[in-house]
Amino acid sequence: MVEGYAETLHRNGGCVVVAPKAPRYIDDSHYPVLRIPSLKTSKAVGPYRLASPIEVRTIAKLKKMPLRLVHCHSPFSLAFLAERTAKACGIPSVYSYHTKYAQDFKRTVPRAFRAFMADFIVQRVRTFDEVWTVSQGAADDLRALGYRGGIVIMRNGCTMPTGEPPGALISVVQASHNIPENVTIFLFVGRMIWYKKIQLILDTLALLKQVGRDFRMLFIGGGQDEHEIAKTTREMGLDDNVIFVGTIYDRELLRAYYARADLFFFPSDFDTSGLVVQEAAALECPSIVLRGSCAAENVTHQKNGICIDDNADQAARAITELLDAPEKIRELGKRARSEVYLSWDDAMKAVMARYEKVIEHTMRRKR
């Protein structure tokens, strides 16, 4: 997402990205990137790096640039750097809250330290001139940490283009996994981690198989739990129906997977925006999402997608009804394309218009 911001801003006046150093990673972007020393985080946190918060040289470099605004996407060490840069340059600052830390801390932080971590984030967020979240669910999570200031909901756009991908690529998807021509395909794209409600997916698939439904479930992505998920899949007797594709970096090939899929099954209640639901909508593939999740905020049940509770029986019934009415699936997909999908260009128009308001308001307040 930060790359998407940077690419658009680069085409509309310029920007500079400040990010932690990553081993063996070489920047080849059109816009300048300042890398600062970093440390590896724990396996429970994920493949992220913690940047050094004390970088006087970086701030000195940034002061020489004609910056108008600082936009921070991390509440930890980079937030310190963003705060100091904004003050040193005399410019406004914006912070975007992307992750459900209140929920995440229950999984990764010992109980005795959760209040400290929550207060740490809230204190950092308060230093910014304006606070954004990507969804109402993300805003609620930030409130749960104790933040009481103003929040602007700035929805993420999707970089996945609309339109049918080449038929040859769809044939590649079929042939790569030996999928029969007319078999039903369910798709999941994301990190292979249990807290994405993957067990709910497997339980639903088991029920569908019990009643004789033929299908293929394609999981695209990698993650710390992928081997355990594959083991559970085998133990549930779903080997013939479930395919672990791995991570796909070719965006055109990924579009072909979305286009070939009949339903996108994404019951995660952890994600704050569910961009993959928008990607599926771009290819007119309707989603099955968890009622009350952030991914479901723009999905209307039975109109442009399906909303379910955390219940495999309910999910299996909803899917069965759709499979018996294929024209309904096509209708949901078309509505998802027009109502769920938000292009990146349209989203960034709103972002840049809001930037100008923040700059104007901050400068007026200083005067």
Image (tube, grey):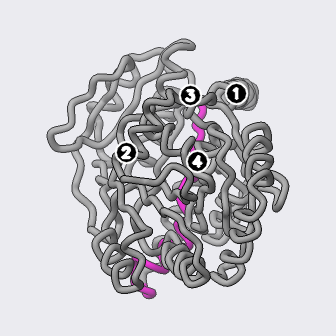
Q: Which residues are magenta?
A: 92-112
Check residue 297 for magenta coloring: no
- The residue singled out by tag 2 in the image is 175
- Per the rendering, the mark at residue 346 is 1
Badge 3 amino acid:
Leu
In the image: residue 51, left or right of residue 277: left
Nearer the observer, 119 or 243:
243
Q: Label 2: few (<14), some or many (≥20) within 10 Å?
A: few
C-alpha gap between disc 2 and disc 3? 49 Å
The answer to which quarter of the image holds residue 294 is bottom right
Label 4–label 1 contact, CB within 8 A: no
Residue visible at 38% across and 62% down?
A: 243
The percent position of residue 333, horizontal first and vertical second, equals: 73, 46
Mark 1 vs mark 2: in front: 2
Check residue 107 for magenta coloring: yes
- Where is the C terminus found, in terms of image quarters? top right
Mark positioned earlier in the residue sequence (4 or 1)? 4
Mark positioned earlier in the residue sequence (4 or 2)? 2
C-alpha gap between disc 1 and disc 2? 36 Å
Nearer the observer, 163 or 106:
163
Residue visible at 48% across and 17% down?
A: 10
